[in-house]
């Protein structure tokens, strides 16, 4: 559901904001002075209904539940440019990750592709399977033909450790 629909009758909820703050490891995002450096470097900017600095502003204003229920938080490609660019260490990335966790806790609708990626990581340890590449001359190459090292998949210990961490959260 789009944020515009969720915000049409919304009122700020400062209790939800405080709950959000308790889940965030630090409170630097309250220092955001809307310099737009996060937005100017955002890889997913064209896909976002809201700009990254606007997400930070809405959380500061108390519209946490609306953001956690929206599709906007799943559009971030987690490139971490906003983390590198922010002069106040108040990047939207950490906020979006907490909002995603809240969405999962609330059992909000999660995009299918995101769930498929998590499933692939659990099964293979990789977000994407190794792929063949095709040149402009329509030649197909794989890792072996390019003399690249074979990808070693994580062992069972990775899956056990990952599931243990997931259960603790």
Image (cartoon, grey):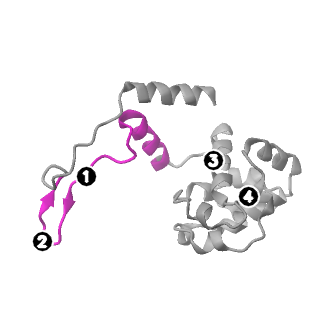
Q: Position of residue 111 (x, y in %)?
A: 52, 49
Label 3: few (<14), some (14–19) or many (≥20) C-alpha neighbours in 10 Å: many
Closer to viewer: mark 4 or mark 1: 1
Q: Are marks 2 and 1 in contact (CB under 8 Å)?
A: no
Q: Quote the CA–CA distance across marks 4 and 1.
A: 40 Å
Reading the image, the residue beneath label 4 is 6
Q: Quote the CA–CA distance across marks 2 and 4.
A: 49 Å
Q: Quote the CA–CA distance across marks 2 and 1.
A: 18 Å
- SS state under label 1: loop
Q: Are marks 3 and 4 in contact (CB under 8 Å)?
A: no
Q: Position of residue 34 (x, y in %)?
A: 75, 71
Q: Position of residue 153 (x, y in %)?
A: 31, 36
Residue drawn 67% across the image and 60% down it: 91
Q: Is residue 118 above or below residue 159?
A: below
Q: Position of residue 52 (x, y in %)?
A: 65, 66
Q: Is residue 101 one of those drawn in magenta?
A: no
Q: Earlier in the sequence, mark 3 or mark 2?
A: 3
Q: Which mark is residue 100?
A: 3
Q: Is residue 65 left or right of residue 138?
A: right
Reading the image, the residue beneath label 2 is 137
Q: Nearer the viewer, residue 138 or 151?
A: 151
- SS state under label 2: loop
Q: In this picture, which residue range is highlighted in magenta?
A: 113-142
Q: Earlier in the sequence, mark 2 or mark 1?
A: 1
Reading the image, the residue beneath label 1 is 131
Q: Earlier in the sequence, mark 2 or mark 4?
A: 4
């Amino acid at each position: 559901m789009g944020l515009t629909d969720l915000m049409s009758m919304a009122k700020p909820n400062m209790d939800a904001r405080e709950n959000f703050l308790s889940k965030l490891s630090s409170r630097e995002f309250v220092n955001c002075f809307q310099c737009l450096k996060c937005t100017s470097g955002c890889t997913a900017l064209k896909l976002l209904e809201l700009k990254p600095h606007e997400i930070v502003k809405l959380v500061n204003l108390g519209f946490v539940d609306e953001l956690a229920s929206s599709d906007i938080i799943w559009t971030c490609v987690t490139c971490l440019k906003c983390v590198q660019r922010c002069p106040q260490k108040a990047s939207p990335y950490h906020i979006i990750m907490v909002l995603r966790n809240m969405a999962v806790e609330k059992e909000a609708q999660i995009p299918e592709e995101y769930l498929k990626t998590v499933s692939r990581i659990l099964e293979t340890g990789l977000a994407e399977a190794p792929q063949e590449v095709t040149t402009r001359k329509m030649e197909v190459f794989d890792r072996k033909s390019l003399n690249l090292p074979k990808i070693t998949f994580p062992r069972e210990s990775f899956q056990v450790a990952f599931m243990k961490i997931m259960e603790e959260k």
